[in-house]
Image (cartoon, rainbow, N blue to C red):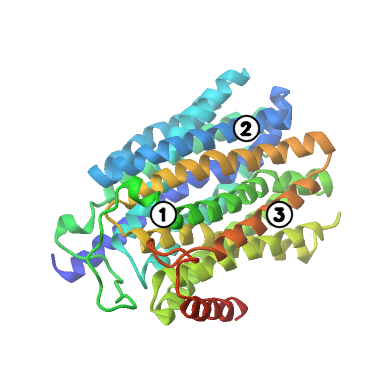
């Protein structure tokens, strides 16, 4: 294949991933705005409404593992096709529910399967085409679909809800279902197979510290999970996800109920995360790739970013605690810092895992990691947030919990080894000291 055509195919892969991420965040970004009206009309507690979201993330996690296996074997098109049908149905069927059990099935199970098809497929498909000094940049462009959804779909929800009565959320979900189905149908069209199928190499390969690019080892899932590297990555991601999903699901309610803001004002600040994220995703991706190029070691560069990422989450939570009953610049600063966190960790941990284990069986390896992380982190984070509110009457304790979870994520990030066959304990002391110094200098900078 000619180089220009290969580059065009790569861009199409990124665009298909952008559509998939947009659709995925069509569920994530709108829930915080819809759960309040749902709770009022249906007469359910916050914990009952949040349970549907928590179940969706659990099913999402289980589905992600199988999606990774399908991806490695048959490519992205069949995965996106299934997600298109179920993604549209998840919103549409939920718009008609009247019982809690039906809600758990439509939003928890149907939407959970749909969204589980999207995360692993979008991240790994980009990683299979872009590695080394190009991955974070291209994934940043693809991941910008998430904040774009948070911004645009906030406007869709706002316009649909205004003056629509207490049950306006139902019509809003129908609209969202149509949008998700249409976008994922386009993703099926734009998706491509792995570069090897076109006899081309992935873009961005860099020489290893020991010499030229080495032939990739084909890992089995059992071999990969016998190494500390994948577990360090899982726990780094897990504790960040617990904090992140707690914040996403409780943030608007925190401002409306604890700080007595008008709902419209709270949504406007919430949208700032999406607006900033549209630009921070690719910009932070470029920054991360420059770190990799400077260090000439992808795993080391990704590790640096995974230390910085949850640290920004802690800072953002501290700004949230400083919010008052008036909408001030502090709230907007918190939103900006959350957008920076968001641009680093989710894609960065995939980049680190790919740097350690390669591309050929990354779908299966990362699919199982997603099963573990998303089966636990988002469920506990979102549910604990709702439970703490019901128990204490305030969302403030949820933010304290998020700070602690981000802090644990930082600790695990510091232990990330730089190869699968070396743990931090097994490395030469002098080498480890030099590497630790480089990491410290970059984090400080």
Residue at left offset 30%, top offset 78%: 210
- Provide the secondary structure element on which disc 2 rests: helix
Distance between the alpha carbons at the discs numbered 1 and 3: 27 Å
Number of the label disc, if any, that sits on residue 227: 1
444 left or right, relative to 198: right
Label 2 to label 1: alpha-carbon separation: 47 Å
Determine whether 70 is above or below 306 in the image. Answer: above
Looking at the image, which is closer to me, 271 or 392?
A: 392
Which residue is drawn at the image coordinates 46% and 77% (left, top)?
Answer: 291
Pick whichever of labels 1 and 3 is earlier in the sequence.
Answer: 1
What crowding class fits label 1: few (fewer than 14 Cα within 10 Å), some (14-19), or many (20 or more)?
some
Task: Give the residue displayed 57% in from the left and 54% down from the top.
Answer: 151
Q: Quadrant where the N terminus lies?
A: bottom left
Q: Position of residue 223 (x, y in %)?
A: 34, 50
Q: What is the number of the mark on residue 169?
A: 2
Q: Residue 396 location, x and y as percent?
A: 80, 48
Q: Nearer the viewer, residue 365 or 189?
A: 365
Q: Is residue 293 left or right of residue 111?
A: left
Crowding around mark 2 (Cα neighbors within 10 Å: few <14, some 14 to 19, many 20+) is: many
Q: Is residue 14 above or below residue 253?
A: below
Q: Is residue 155 or residue 101 the one in the foreground? A: 101
N-terminal of the pair, mark 2 or mark 3, is 2
Q: Where residue 404 is drawn, which disc sits there? A: 3
């Amino acid at each position: 294949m000619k180089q220009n055509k290969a580059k065009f195919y790569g861009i199409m892969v990124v665009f298909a991933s952008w559509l998939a991420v947009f659709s995925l965040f069509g569920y994530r970004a709108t829930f915080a705005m819809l759960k309040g009206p749902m709770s009022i009309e249906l007469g359910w507690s916050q914990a009952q409404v949040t349970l549907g979201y928590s179940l969706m993330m659990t099913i999402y996690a289980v589905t992600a593992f199988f999606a990774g296996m399908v991806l490695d074997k048959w490519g992205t098109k069949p995965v996106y096709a299934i997600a298109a049908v179920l993604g549209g149905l998840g919103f549409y069927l939920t718009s008609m529910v009247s019982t809690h059990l039906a809600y758990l099935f439509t939003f928890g199970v149907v939407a959970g399967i749909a969204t589980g098809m999207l995360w692993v497929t979008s991240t790994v498909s980009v990683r299979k085409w872009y590695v080394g000094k190009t991955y974070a940049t291209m994934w940043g462009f693809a991941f910008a679909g998430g904040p774009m959804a948070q911004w645009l779909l906030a406007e869709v929800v706002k316009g649909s809800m205004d003056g629509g009565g207490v049950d306006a959320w139902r019509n809003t979900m129908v609209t969202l279902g149509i949008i998700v189905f249409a976008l994922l149908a386009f993703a099926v069209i734009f998706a491509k197979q792995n570069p090897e199928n076109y006899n081309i190499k992935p873009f961005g390969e860099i020489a290893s510290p020991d010499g030229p690019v080495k032939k990739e080892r084909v890992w089995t899932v059992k071999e990969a999970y016998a190494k500390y590297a994948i577990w360090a990555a899982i726990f780094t991601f897990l504790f960040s996800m617990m904090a992140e999903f707690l914040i996403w699901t409780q943030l608007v309610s925190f401002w409306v109920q604890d700080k007595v803001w008008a709902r419209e004002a709270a949504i406007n600040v919430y949208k700032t995360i999406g607006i900033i994220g549209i630009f921070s995703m690719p910009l932070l991706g470029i920054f991360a790739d420059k770190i990799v190029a400077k260090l000439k070691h992808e795993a080391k560069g990704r590790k640096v970013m995974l230390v910085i990422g949850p640290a920004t989450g802690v800072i953002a939570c501290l700004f949230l605690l400083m919010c008052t009953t008036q909408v001030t610049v502090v709230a907007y600063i918190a939103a900006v810092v959350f957008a920076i966190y968001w641009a680093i960790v989710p894609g960065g941990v995939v980049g680190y895992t790919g740097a350690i284990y390669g591309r050929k069986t990354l779908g299966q390896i990362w699919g199982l990691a997603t099963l573990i992380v998303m089966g636990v982190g988002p469920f506990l984070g979102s549910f604990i947030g709702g439970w703490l509110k019901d128990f204490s009457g305030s969302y403030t304790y949820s933010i304290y919990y998020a700070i602690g979870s981000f802090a644990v994520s930082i600790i695990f990030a510091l232990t990330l080894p730089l190869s699968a066959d070396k743990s931090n304990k097994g490395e030469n002391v002098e080498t480890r000291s030099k590497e630790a110094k480089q990491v410290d200098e970059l984090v400080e900078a």
